[in-house]
């Protein structure tokens, strides 16, 4: 007989089971399955205790989650008087300023280097500014041989950002910081449309100050643009359902069309939004005129990119053809079985990582420098899961807001589930999930504050201040203090190439020669050391090994970016080389030095290796 206090609803049982499995998986990863599955008479008692602890902790975690969901059910449905318009306006203004500060402060330190993918996407515009048309597409990193394409319209957006902020570290950060800032009012609008002003305020706070949005807003990458546009599209769709105004249909369609100019996972998100429009129209809840308006606007928004596929239909699919579930995977840690079980095993591997990324599961991929930690701190992750679980209740699934948010969340997960494992961060491919996650987390936090204030007889404003402080303490401060200095961050963000570019820019005029043996991102060096005026092309740096430099017989001094061994080899030929400066103390083998050729007529020869 189960005590009444421990009885859990059906939805609570599903949440409890999910948390149980995720907690068991986390403990198994820390203990190692090899250890847990080994058995001998000597360590049998120890293993039995380990298994008992694993099951007990997992059961307690699942039970707590289920009970928490049921205890908040009344508060989820409670109708409260909304905050005054003045309070919402003041809160929004302060929060927006805080989000700008967090995304633009110290652009040369957070992150400590430049992310290479933005430069690959915009290399055409870097080399020949203003030469691209607004329509069509350009290959992403032409030297890589990938099928990925970058929309020319997105490249033009990056070029405009460079012209406004400068083609420097601030400009590179602004590529993602600008949509990152705009995502804050967008998620506030979505939360308000879906569940009221209080939820919108909490969702905006989480988007403004949480670790993951801050990291991708400083990452100089296209992902946050997808998040921003998807939030606008979903919010405008719900506003259309509420008001029936064609203006909101136009906004929804435009945002959905522009969404397709961003990350390749946008196709799943746009499909989910389109499916919602079709289903609502067939049910008679949206007029066909509004659907037609949104569809035409979406088509016009996508048209500049679609022109490329009309001219080159063989490029349809783009990056999706590089990263589908069956594509070859070279990264270590991905299970490989071969034969008919290969795809099911990969799908199961993805299911574990993508389903658990909000709670316990750390990102298995080092890119984005989030490896080793979940995307959310525990309080925010629990709030998001409670919100999702509440939305899945039978009585809640039929609300337009929940139907649309769950569709978009499922699309975000599908974009990751059916991609090859581990070649990119799970939070990149499933980035569309985070908008709904912060909305549902905001709804759950508001419900928890209401329930706690009633039971504890504490003013809600005091609990709200405490909850906001927890978000800043567990999400914002680690991003500002720990993330920039982490060894993984410094390795992934091309610190040495960035610092070498800064140093070369400070050294003034003169020819630069690049030694490929330094194994750095040359494009990062060229962009950082190149002209700051976005209207001036970024020149190619001459490439030459010490042997090639000597054979070419240079007549003028050069700034040489090489390794310490390369500099020694150049000295042995008779060149006069400065001591060399290591731009990155953590990578002292790479140096920048002034190299002066021997006088004309001097015979130089490099010794045999």
Image (cartoon, grey):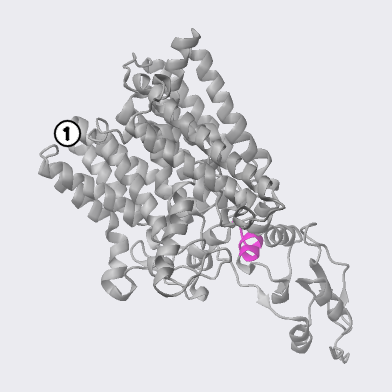
Answer with left or right where residue 578 lies relative to residue 74.
right
Q: Quadrant of residue 138?
A: bottom left
Most extreme residue toward the top is 457
Image location (x, y in percent) of residue 344 = 40, 64
Magenta residues, as a range? 524-532
Image location (x, y in percent) of residue 383 = 46, 31
The residue that appears at 78% across and 87% down in the rendered structure is 553
Mostly what secondary structure, the magenta segment? helix
> Foreground residue, 191 or 37?
37
Answer with left or right where residue 150 lies relative to residue 110.
left
Do we see residue 529 in this rendering? yes
Instruction: Please identify the quadrant where the N terminus is shown.
Output: top left
> Foreground residue, 340 or 594?
340
> Foreground residue, 422 or 59?
59
Image position of 391 with respect to 568: above or below: above
Image position of 215 with respect to 264: above or below: above
Answer with left or right where residue 173 lies relative to residue 591.
left
The residue that appears at 20% across and 45% down in the rendered structure is 277
Q: Does the magenta segment cover residue 530?
A: yes
Residue under numbered circle 1: 244
> Foreground residue, 57 or 45?
45
The residue that appears at 70% across and 47% down in the rendered structure is 485
Most extreme residue toward the front is 41
Q: Quadrant of residue 187?
A: top left
Image position of 439 with respect to 223: above or below: above
Image position of 451 with respect to 604: above or below: above
The residue that appears at 19% across and 30% down in the rendered structure is 243
Mark 1 is surrounded, within 10 Å at the Cα level, by few (under 14), some (14 to 19) or many (20 or more) other residues, namely some
Q: Secondary structure at mark 1?
A: loop
């Amino acid at each position: 007989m189960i005590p009444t206090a421990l009885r859990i609803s059906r939805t609570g049982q599903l949440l409890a089971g999910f948390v149980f499995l995720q907690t068991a998986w986390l403990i198994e990863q820390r203990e190692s399955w090899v250890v847990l599955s080994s058995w001998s008479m000597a360590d049998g008692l120890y293993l039995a205790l380990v298994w008992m602890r694993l099951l007990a902790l997992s059961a307690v975690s699942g039970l707590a989650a289920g009970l928490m969901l049921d205890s908040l059910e009344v508060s989820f449905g409670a109708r409260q008087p909304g905050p005054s318009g003045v309070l919402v306006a003041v809160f929004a203004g302060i929060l927006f300023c805080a989000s700008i500060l967090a995304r633009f402060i110290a652009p040369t330190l957070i992150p400590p280097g430049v992310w290479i993918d933005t430069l690959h996407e915009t290399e055409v515009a870097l080399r020949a500014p203003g030469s691209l048309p607004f329509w069509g597409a350009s290959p992403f990193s032409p030297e890589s041989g990938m099928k990925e394409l970058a929309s020319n319209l997105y490249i033009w957006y990056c070029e405009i950002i460079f012209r406004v902020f400068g083609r420097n570290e601030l400009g590179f950060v602004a590529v993602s910081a600008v949509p990152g800032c705009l995502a804050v009012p967008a998620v506030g609008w979505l939360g308000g449309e879906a569940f009221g002003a209080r939820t919108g305020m909490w969702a905006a706070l989480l988007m403004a100050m949480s670790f993951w949005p801050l990291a991708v807003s400083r990452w100089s990458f296209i992902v946050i643009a997808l998040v921003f546009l998807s939030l606008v599209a979903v919010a405008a769709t719900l506003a259309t359902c509420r008001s029936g105004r064609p203006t909101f249909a136009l906004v929804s369609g435009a945002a959905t069309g522009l969404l397709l100019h961003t990350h390749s996972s946008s196709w799943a998100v746009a499909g989910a939004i389109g499916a919602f429009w079709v289903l609502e129209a067939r049910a008679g809840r949206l007029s066909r005129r509004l659907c037609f308006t949104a569809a035409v606007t979406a088509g016009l928004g996508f048209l500049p990119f679609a022109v490329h596929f009309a001219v080159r239909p063989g490029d349809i699919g783009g990056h999706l053809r590089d990263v589908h579930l069956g594509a070859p995977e070279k990264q270590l840690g991905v299970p490989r079985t071969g034969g008919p079980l290969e795809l099911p095993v990969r799908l199961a591997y993805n299911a574990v990582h993508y389903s658990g990324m909000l709670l316990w599961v750390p990102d298995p991929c080092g890119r984005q420098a989030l490896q080793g930690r979940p995307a959310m701190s525990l309080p925010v992750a629990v709030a998001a899961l409670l919100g999702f679980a509440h939305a899945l209740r039978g009585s809640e699934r039929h609300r337009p807001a929940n139907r649309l948010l769950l569709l978009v969340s499922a699309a975000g997960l599908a974009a990751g589930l059916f991609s090859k494992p581990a070649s990119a961060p799970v939070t990149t491919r499933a980035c569309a999930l985070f908008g709904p996650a912060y909305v549902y987390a905001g709804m759950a936090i508001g419900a928890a504050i209401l329930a706690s204030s009633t039971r504890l007889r504490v003013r809600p404003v005091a609990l709200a201040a405490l909850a906001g402080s927890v978000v800043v303490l567990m999400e914002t401060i680690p991003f500002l203090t720990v993330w920039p200095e982490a060894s993984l961050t410094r390795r992934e963000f091309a610190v040495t190439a960035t610092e070498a570019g800064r140093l070369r820019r400070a050294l003034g005029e003169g020819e630069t020669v690049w030694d490929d043996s330094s194994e750095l991102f040359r494009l990062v060096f060229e962009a950082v050391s190149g002209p700051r005026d976005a209207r001036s092309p970024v020149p190619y740096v001459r490439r030459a090994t010490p042997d090639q430099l000597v054979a070419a017989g240079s007549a003028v001094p050069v700034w040489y970016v090489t390794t310490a061994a390369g500099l020694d080899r150049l000295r042995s030929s008779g060149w006069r080389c400065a001591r060399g400066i290591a731009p990155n103390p953590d990578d002292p083998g790479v140096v920048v030095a002034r190299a002066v050729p021997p006088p004309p007529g001097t015979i130089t020869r490099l010794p045999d290796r």
